[in-house]
Amino acid sequence: MIRYRVKLTPDDNDTFLVTAPDFPEVITAGDTREEALAMAVGAFREMIAGKIHYQEPIPAPSKIRAKDDFITLPLQTEMKIRLYESLQQKGVKKAELARRMKLHRQEIERLLDFKQSTSIGKIERAFAALGKQLKIEVADAS
């Protein structure tokens, strides 16, 4: 799971302001703690989508201590982030991944797009084309 630390600050208008040490650009708010955290997930997804679009590195999450608030990114978002990071680490361009997978480049764009639902099979194929294996772990909720 990819979890990012956030700071929730009660605002003077009975809302909660959310900021993020790992992403100073992320600022959002909500009427309740729960709403603020949900809004933060969306803000992180948008910020990371921008980093992917502009082929920039995605900051690694900082250590979360017991007293810290945090958000957990959805699983499909995490898989797409891991795929993007694998492309970057291997120096493989999207066009090359498309060639390896026998797909059009636009399909690779959709594969990395958080707004597009992608089958687990297609994500597995993409990792395999990079010499990687996708592993999923099931654990008790904490």
Image (tube, rainbow, N blue to C red):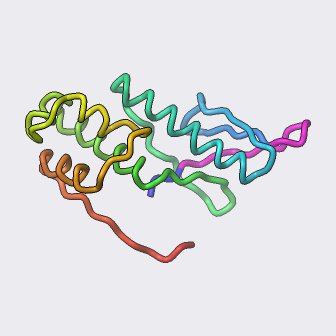
74 in the magenta segment: no
* Residue 96 in which image quadrant: top left
Q: Position of residue 126 (x, y in %)?
A: 19, 46
Q: Position of residue 113 (x, y in %)?
A: 37, 36
Q: Which residue reaches farthest bottom?
A: 140
136 versus 120 height, above or below: below
Name the quadrant of the C terminus.
Answer: bottom right
Q: Is residue 13 left or right of residue 136?
A: right
Q: For the point 50% across and 50% down, which residue is it?
A: 73
Q: For the point 58% across and 51% down, which residue is it?
A: 71
9 in the magenta segment: yes
Q: For the point 46% across and 35% down, which residue is it?
A: 48
Count of picture labels: 0
Q: For the point 51% across and 33% down, which residue is it?
A: 46
Q: Which residue reaches farthest top?
A: 54
Seen from the viewer's position, the closer of residues 18 and 39 is: 39
- Which region of the structure is painted magenta? 4-15
Q: Is residue 15 left or right of residue 93?
A: right
* Residue 21 in which image quadrant: top right
* Residue 90 in which image quadrant: top left
Q: Is residue 104 left or right of residue 19?
A: left
Name the quadrant of the N terminus.
Answer: bottom left
